[in-house]
Amino acid sequence: MARIEENGPDFLPRDSSCFGCGERSTAFWAGRMDVCVCFRCAITILPRLIADAVPAVGLQTWADRLSSEFWRAIALRVERRHRSRSNRSDLEPSVRQLLESLEERLSD
């Protein structure tokens, strides 16, 4: 997944409107088929799509894995956003604490 604002127009798929509502997208996934999504649909539609896609058998296992993948993606997003800074000591304390907390969750 990539945030449109961070990658600029050169990286945009041809049709960068949200797959769910047709509004302006804030992120996209470049795969076999490009998928663009706005913030609202990322919060409301994507979780429903994921719920429909996972097998009903072992649902708790899939939910746990989804949670881990989500927090990993959040950690990567926060780190990517602050990567341009020289090191973690330069980060705001709240951001540094969030990264440390996420690393802990991911190591479990």
Image: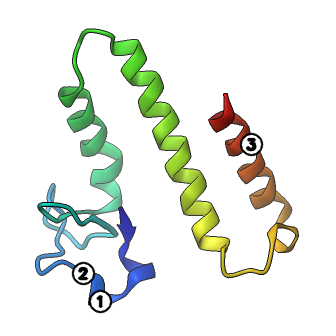
Q: CA distance from mark 2 to mark 1?
A: 5 Å
Left/right of residue 95 with respect to residue 64 in the rendered view: right
* Location of residue 90 in the rendering, given as x and y in whole percent from the top left corner: 85, 74
* Marked residue nearer the N-terminal end (3 or 2): 2
**Which residue is label 3 attached to?**
101
Q: CA distance from mark 3 to mark 1?
A: 33 Å
Left/right of residue 71 with respect to residue 94 in the rendered view: left
**Which residue is label 2 attached to?**
12
Extreme residue toward the bottom, this view = 10
Q: Is disc 3 placed on a helix, strand or loop?
A: helix
At 22% across and 18% down in the image, what residue appears? Answer: 55
* Location of residue 8 in the rendering, given as x and y in whole percent from the top left corner: 36, 87
Disc 2, disc 1: CB below 8 Å? yes
Mark 3: amino acid? Ser
Extreme residue toward the top, this view = 57
Where's the C terminus, which quadrant?
A: top right
**Which residue is label 1 attached to?**
9
* Marked residue nearer the N-terminal end (3 or 1): 1
Q: Is disc 2 placed on a helix, strand or loop?
A: loop
At 66% across and 74% down in the image, what residue appears? Answer: 83
The image shows residue 69, relative to residue 10, as above or below, that is above
Mark 2: amino acid? Leu
* Location of residue 107 in the rendering, given as x and y in whole percent from the top left corner: 67, 34
Q: Is disc 1 placed on a helix, strand or loop?
A: helix
| Mark 2 surroundings: few (<14), some (14-19) or many (≥20) residues within 10 A | many
The image shows residue 62, relative to residue 80, as above or below, that is above
The image shows a total of numbered marks equal to: 3
Left/right of residue 7 with respect to residue 28 in the rendered view: right
